Every structure is written in structure tokens, then in C-alpha cells.
Image: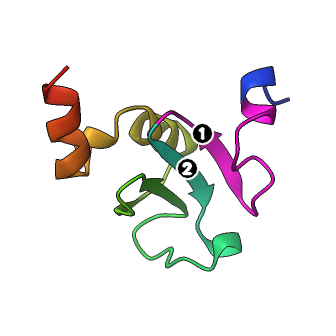
Amino acid sequence: MRSPRQATHPHAGHAGFVHGATHATAYLAEPQGMDDEGGKYAVVCEHNNIVNVTSKRDARLCAIYPGNFCSDCYKRDALR
């Protein structure tokens, strides 16, 4: 069951939606038409950088901390 926050996330109705955070969203890659070679989950940050991971847990973590795969997100977070 989705949390109330997840149900109201702007991307919640998109195909393959898994988890949404402030600056990134995790999806099942295949329903979104994305390459799933690196893992069945794809995480897209606000800078349109994408990382594939193999577990739902890792997808959620990447969505929460997109600075781990996006240098622009990393810079933004470093300035806080």
C-alpha cells in the first residue's frame, strides 16, 4: 500500500512508478520504455540523469539521495 505522500506525488500515475522524492523519481524501467540492462529499476533526477539498480530498496535510496549518481545534485546538496 502506498503512503499518502506517495499517492499524491506528481509522478504517481506514471507507468512503473516506484518511489518519488523531492529531486528524483524511481520507476520500473521497462514500463517507462527505459533500458533495463543495468537493473530493472531506473532512477531519474531533476537533471535527467538516470541510474539503473537491481533492487527496490536501492531505487528508493537513489531517489532520496540523487547526489550519489548525479554531480549536479551532489553540488546542490553540498551547498546546503
Which secondary structure lies at badge 1? strand
Q: Is residue 15 inside the magenta stretch? A: yes
Q: Is the residue 35 above or below the residue 63 in the image?
A: below
- Magenta region, main secondary structure: loop
In this rendering, the count of numbered labels is: 2
- Label 1: which residue? 20
Position in image of residue 7 (x %, y %): 81, 34
Q: Are marks 1 and 2 in contact (CB under 8 Å)?
A: yes
Residue 19 at x, y percent in the picture: 62, 40
Tell me the residue at 76%/63% (across/down).
15
- Residue at x 46%, y 64% (from the top left corner): 39
- In which quadrant of the rendered view does residue 52 lie? bottom left
Give the quarter of the figure containing the N terminus. Answer: top right
Q: Amino acid at mark 2?
A: Ala
Identify the residue at image location x=81%, y=53%. Answer: 13
Crowd around label 2: few <14 · some 14–19 · many ≥20 (10 Å): many
Along the line of sight, the residue nearer the viewer: 72 or 43: 72
Q: Is residue 77 above or below residue 69?
A: above
Query: Residue 44, how many percent across, how many down?
Result: 45, 57
Reading the image, the residue beneath label 2 is 26
Please report whichever mark, 1 or 2, sits nearer to the chain's N-terminal start. Answer: 1
Considering depth in this image, is 18 or 14 the residue closer to the camera?
14
Kind of residue indicated by mark 1: Gly
Under circle 2, the secondary element is strand
Q: CA distance from mark 1 to mark 2?
A: 6 Å
Give, as a single range, the part of the protein colored magenta.
6-22
Horizontal side, residue 14 vs residue 35: left or right: right
- Front residue of 71 and 36: 71
Which image quadrant: the C terminus?
top left
Would you identify the image quadrant in which residue 2 lies? top right
Residue 66: say if magenta.
Answer: no
Q: Mark on residue 6?
A: none
